[in-house]
Image (cartoon, helix red, strand yellow):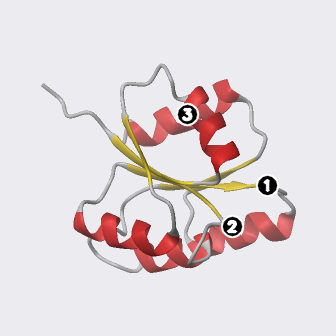
Amino acid sequence: MPKTPTIYLSLSESVASRVKEALQGLKCRLVQIPDGEELIEVSRRDPPDLIIIEKEIPKLDGYAVVLLLKNESRTAEVPVIGICKCLTDAEAEKARDAGCDDYVCYPFEKEEFSSLVKKYLAR
């Protein structure tokens, strides 16, 4: 039996709520992680199948977290979807430069977001 994919969420409450709604039909385990430092620690110990992160998270900027994770062999291959609250070209470029595999602008269309997550879980 295939294992249930695990997705780590490091998001504000409002964004996490929308993400959870969008992913309701997916058979996956969502784990809310409160801050950047803990996300790094937990990801190193038990790498997830996907990380969904916001730039503005406590203790460590989301993009700094992505940079650190993408530069470690144990977590480098974990896909990361960044959620930007205000997506300008500069913000999109920062997400890409940090190592996000993809990014979406908040608020996002739930169906579109769900399809994006499925794409990364199917890898």
Q: What amino acid is found at the position of numbered circle 3 in the picture?
A: Lys
**What's the mark number on residue 56?**
2
Q: Is residue 121 left or right of residue 54?
A: left
Marks 2 and 1 close (CB-CB < 8 Å): yes
Residue marked by disc 3: 20
Residue marked by disc 1: 85
Residue at image position (26%, 33%) is 4
Disc 2 and disc 1: Cα gap in Å?
Answer: 9 Å
Q: What amino acid is found at the position of numbered circle 2 in the picture?
A: Glu
Disc 1 and disc 3: Cα gap in Å?
Answer: 17 Å
Residue at image position (62%, 37%) is 17
Q: Is residue 35 left or right of residue 83?
A: left
Residue 79 drawn above or below residue 57: above
Callout 1: 10 Å neighbours few (<14), some, many (20+)? some
Furthest residue in direction left, as rendered: 1
Q: Residue 86 location, x and y as percent?
A: 84, 57
Marks 1 and 3 close (CB-CB < 8 Å): no
Secondary structure type for disc 1? loop
Callout 2: 10 Å neighbours few (<14), some, many (20+)? some
| Dot 2 or dot 3, earlier in sequence | 3
Q: Within the image, what quadrant is residue 41 found in?
A: bottom left
Q: What amino acid is found at the position of numbered circle 1 in the picture?
A: Lys
Q: Within the image, what quadrant is residue 123 found in?
A: top left
| Dot 2 or dot 1, earlier in sequence | 2
Residue 26 drawn above or below residue 61: above
- 29 or 12: which is nearer to us? 12
Q: Is residue 105 left or right of residue 69?
A: right
Secondary structure type for disc 3? helix
Residue 104 drawn above or below residue 35: above
